[in-house]
Amino acid sequence: MNRPFPTLAILDSNPAVLVRMETLRRATLYARQDPPSAKELLTRLRARATEAPEDARGALAWFDFGYLAESYKQWIGKNELNPASVVDGYAWVKRAIQQRGDDPEMEFAAAIITLRSSNDDHRDHVQKAMAGAKTDALLAQNLASRFGGETVSAILAAQPSER
């Protein structure tokens, strides 16, 4: 397939991480209707990530691939063929966070990915995202919307306790 992917054009425009997350979430919804396109998009993002330099732009490519893989896992049922079933997207997102440094929006993404896992890193991701939300109103809105609280203490109280 050689169809144009609006998702790639949006990601190439170098938007903020929250925009990337929404773009990849929407791509996931559309991809469910077209499994060959779902596989192709994942393949293209994997190629971009594996060829990406060890810098901030490379971190975005790693993030995109990892976040898309984890989005696919949340959306595709057990009886459906999932092109991301063997991909540890969380590891790619963590790599992006390490490369990029302090990025509360990537921490928010990691918090979403680890929400239902037994990973003890979840609360750390939430706390780092909340720390950045003090100066990022859009991130603060997303945190409150996703994790159900208006304040840091309310959001933390709503999170699962230590596992």
Image: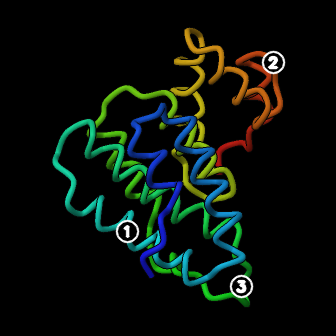
N-terminal of the pair, mark 3 or mark 1, is 1
N-terminal of the pair, mark 2 or mark 1, is 1
Query: Residue 99's quadrant in the figure?
Result: top left
Amino acid type, label 1 = Arg
Tell me the CA gap for discs 3 and 1: 24 Å
SS of the residue under disc 2: loop
Q: How many marks?
A: 3
Q: Nearer the viewer, residue 115 or 18?
A: 18
Label 3 neighbour load within 10 Å: few <14, some 14-19, many 20+? few
Q: Which residue is mark 1?
A: 44
Task: Identify which residue is drawn at 48% across, 37% down.
Answer: 106
Task: Identify which residue is drawn at 76% across, 37% down.
Answer: 146
Q: Which residue is mark 2?
A: 150
Task: Identify which residue is drawn at 51% across, 75% down.
Answer: 84
Vertical relation: 21 (above or below) 51: above
Query: Residue 94: x and y, percent?
Result: 39, 48
Q: Nearer the viewer, residue 59 or 122?
A: 59
Amino acid type, label 3 = Lys
